Amino acid sequence: MPFILTNDGMVQRAVRPLALPLFLGSLLTAPVAVSEGVLLARRELKYLASVYVLSTVLFPFGLFRLKVSGAPVSHVWYGFVFFQLFRALCFTGKLWGGVAVERIASLLGSKKKAESSSVTA
């Protein structure tokens, strides 16, 4: 869909390899922004700061490795996708991770209880 940006064929060909990483990076922006806002509202400032510091420290090292390896520009945008994915997993994991683990544990626990009661009966 490079025609959305321009009708110049040369620019369209240059942008085409970037379409997937740009799409994926932008797709992850909403969960990051929403969960980040919820964590801010909940005053989870130490957690947010630790994720900010960790992601800000790790991302440039990845970019430097890409630069040294001579990777194409599209790899930089895939790096942004991983940056956003990391932040999305950290933020949504903080919000929903405990609930998900509890639900899974309760499902497994109730299954084990049912199995153990049928074995003892």
Image: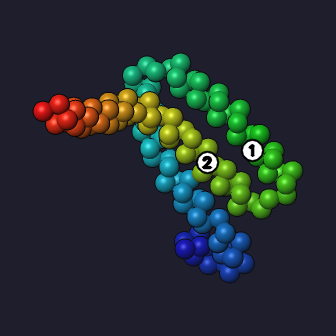
| Inter-mark Cα distance, 2 to 1 | 10 Å
Location of residue 88 in the rendering, given as x and y in whole percent from the top left corner: 50, 41
Q: Residue at x 77, y 40 (%)?
A: 61
Q: Residue at x 16, y 37 (%)?
A: 118
Q: Nearer the viewer, residue 10 or 38?
A: 38
Which dot marks residue 82?
2
Taking the image as drawn, is residue 38 in sight?
Answer: no
**Local crowd at mark 1 within 10 Å, few (<14), some, or many (≥20)?**
some
Taking the image as drawn, is residue 23 in sight?
Answer: yes
- Give the mark count: 2
In-image side of 67 versus 6 (left or right): right
Quadrant where the C terminus sits is top left
Quadrant where the N terminus sits is bottom right
Looking at the rendered structure, the secondary structure element under dot 1 is helix
Q: Is residue 108 above or below residue 48?
A: below
Q: Earlier in the sequence, mark 2 or mark 1?
A: 1
Q: Is residue 11 above or below residue 99?
A: below
Q: Which residue is mark 1?
A: 62
Location of residue 90 in the rendering, given as x and y in whole percent from the top left corner: 51, 35
Quadrant in the picture for residue 95: top left
